[in-house]
Amino acid sequence: MTTVTRWWWVRHAPVINPSGALYGASEVPADVSDRVAFSRLAGLLPQGAVWLTSHLSRARATAAAIQDAGLAGHDPHVEERIGEQSFGAWHGRQHAEIAHEMQDGHRFWVSPAAHVPPEGESFAQVIGRVEDAVRHWTAAHAGRDIIAVSHGGPIRAALALALGIDPDRALSFVVENLSVTRIDHVAGEGLGGNWRVVIVNRTPACS
């Protein structure tokens, strides 16, 4: 018997960040005013799903706006392991400012997946914690739909896990605000793998 668990990853709404500073895992508000986009998003996602959000307010506000737009659901489980990458001491600073201070070149962009920002975490570490969360919730709710309202980094991490690709390659994926990425876990014999990627970066405008 084949059991398919469908992960519907949603990136949060656009953030309000007029200075363009690096925000990562810090708290910044989201703009959830686009009622048309949320209505379309609610129409794309499944009824009766298990809901997860990261602990950050922009993910929780996005989940609430989707439900308010017509997709009924229980209060989401807050799952910190699908939170955005922590850039540590770089939070709130400009990209150009950080690059200027690096004595041996801006290693975060040269080798982004492996480099650990001061007091932060690498993208490779994000993949590790996202994998833990995915395996936990897949086992707990096998055969269900799981809507995970998260962030660009963790969604790329989930794609890296599903495709078995190098972390640096996973950073090539575009994950726009309010986009949907669907990844199915397939449990069963002789199926050629445990994961299949169904949708990547589908925005409400494309629904």
Image (tube, helix red, strand yellow):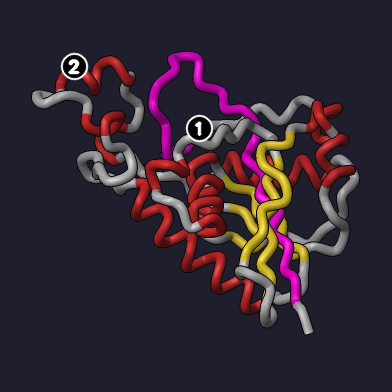
The C terminus, quarter of image: top right
Q: Is 35 placed above or below 7 here?
A: above
Q: Look at the numbered discs 2 and 1 and tell me whether their residues touch, using CB distance below 8 Å.
A: no
Residue 59 can be seen in this image: yes
Please indicate whether residue 203 sits to the left or right of residue 153 in the image.
Answer: right
The N terminus, quarter of image: bottom right
Residue 89 found in image quarter: top left
Which of the two residues, 68 or 24, is positioned nearer the viewer here? Answer: 24
| Residue on which disc 1 sits | 28
Locate residue 87, reporting x and y percent: 32, 39
Magenta span:
3-27
Q: Is 51 placed above or below 13 here?
A: below
Residue at 67% over, 42% down: 200
Q: Mark 1 is on which residue type? A: Val
Residue at 24% over, 23% down: 98
Q: Mark 2 is on which residue type? A: His
Classify mark 1: residues with Cα within 10 Å, few (<14), some (14-19) or many (20+).
Answer: some
| Residue on which disc 2 sits | 100
Q: Secondary structure at mark 2?
A: helix
Please indicate whether residue 16 sits to the left or right of residue 62 in the image.
Answer: left
Which of the two residues, 104 or 22, is positioned nearer the viewer here? Answer: 104
Locate residue 110, reporting x and y percent: 27, 30
